Image (tube, helix red, strand yellow):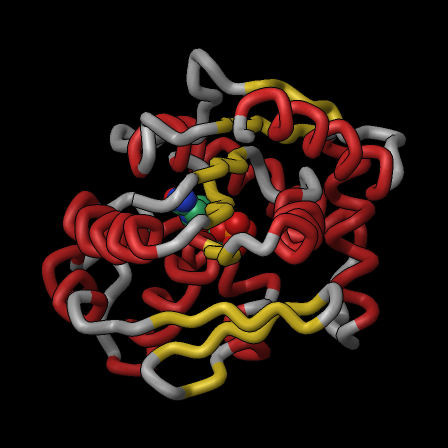
């Protein structure tokens, strides 16, 4: 079993940027579990399977192989040899992923893949339920958060840089809905593990947050 660092929190809290940099710094494997739910939604849509059909979407997920290649501050998501990065990183696919992630069968299939990856490597997993469900015995657990306005600003900037025509208000509203969707679902809702370290990233720059996390990690992992 590798050493596991769990990073959970709502969208736009800075999880991705921070997890990637931290993984590079510590030499851990980076696993983006949100990208796995996004890919499940993408493949289901392409196959014409309704996102509510948990059994059929889960069947699609059973034999998927993911790799996450960190290249500087970007990550390439490759699923069964196909680069899905651009297709899954859209505003819309975030909401579809949130919908597909409500299905227990889909969660079961993807959690199994996540555990198998984590068992083989020292890994940093980012998501919503890593510290509560996927790896409740993780060596270190963080819960990253920030105000809704700041999270929406960050996400809007990211999407604008990629050329997606979406307004700040739209991003903010979708984010609010997605948070509600993720926090209120019956299975593995977004919530901090009891032993998670809470970090509010509002107004903080990335290097400062990384330093804070590294300090906690060093105290817990030798
Ligand atoms: O982190 P993200 O925005 O890429 O995640 C997309 C959606 O996937 C998110 O709205 C909820 C779902 N998700 C989940 O249910 N459990 C995870 N561990 C990660 C993501």
Instruction: Quadrant for the N terminus, please.
Output: top left
Question: Residue 120 sits in which quadrant?
Answer: bottom left
Residue placed furthest toward the front: 222
Residue 188 image position (x, y, % from top left): 31, 32
Residue 91 image position (x, y, % from top left): 61, 62
Q: Nearer the viewer, residue 125 or 163?
A: 125
Left or right placement of residue 172 versus residue 37 in this view = right
Image vertical order of residue 133 relative to residue 28, above or below: above
Left or right placement of residue 53 versus residue 218 in this view = left
**Residue plotted at (50% across, 27% down):** 141
Instruction: Quadrant for the C terminus, please.
Output: top right
Question: Residue 2 sits in which quadrant?
Answer: top left
Give the number of callouts. Answer: 0
**Residue plotted at (74% across, 40% down):** 151
Image vertical order of residue 206 relative to residue 60, above or below: above
Q: Nearer the viewer, residue 198 or 118?
A: 118
Residue 31 image position (x, y, % from top left): 47, 56
**Is residue 114 in view from this perspective?**
yes
Q: Nearer the viewer, residue 185 or 24?
A: 24
**Residue plotted at (27% across, 48% down):** 115
Residue 221 image position (x, y, % from top left): 53, 29
Question: Residue 208 sits in which quadrant?
Answer: top right
**Residue plotted at (71% across, 26% down):** 215
Q: Nearer the viewer, residue 143 or 216?
A: 216
**Is residue 100 in view from this perspective?**
no
Left or right placement of residue 221 versus residue 57 in this view = right
Image vertical order of residue 8 relative to residue 95, above or below: above
């Amino acid at each position: 079993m590798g050493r596991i660092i769990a990073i959970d929190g709502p969208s736009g809290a800075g999880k991705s940027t921070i997890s990637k940099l931290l993984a590079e710094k510590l030499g851990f494997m980076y696993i983006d579990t949100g990208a796995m739910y996004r890919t499940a939604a993408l493949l289901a849509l392409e196959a014409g399977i309704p996102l509510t059909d948990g059994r059929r979407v889960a069947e699609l997920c059973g034999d998927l192989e993911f790799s996450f290649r960190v290249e500087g501050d970007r990550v390439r998501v490759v699923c069964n040899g196909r680069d899905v990065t651009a297709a899954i990183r859209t505003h819309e696919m975030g909401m579809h992923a949130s919908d597909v992630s409500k299905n227990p069968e889909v969660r079961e299939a993807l959690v199994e893949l996540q555990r198998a990856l984590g068992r083989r490597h020292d890994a940093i997993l980012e998501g919503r339920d890593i510290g509560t469900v996927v790896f409740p015995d993780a060596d270190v657990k963080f819960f990253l958060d920030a105000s809704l306005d700041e999270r929406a600003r960050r996400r809007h900037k990211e999407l604008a840089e990629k050329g997606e025509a979406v307004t700040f208000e739209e991003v903010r509203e979708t984010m609010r809905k997605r948070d509600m969707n993720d926090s209120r679902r019956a299975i593995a809702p977004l919530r901090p593990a009891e032993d998670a370290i809470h970090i509010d990233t509002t107004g903080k720059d990335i290097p400062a947050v990384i330093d804070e996390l590294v300090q906690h990690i060093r105290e817990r992992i030798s």
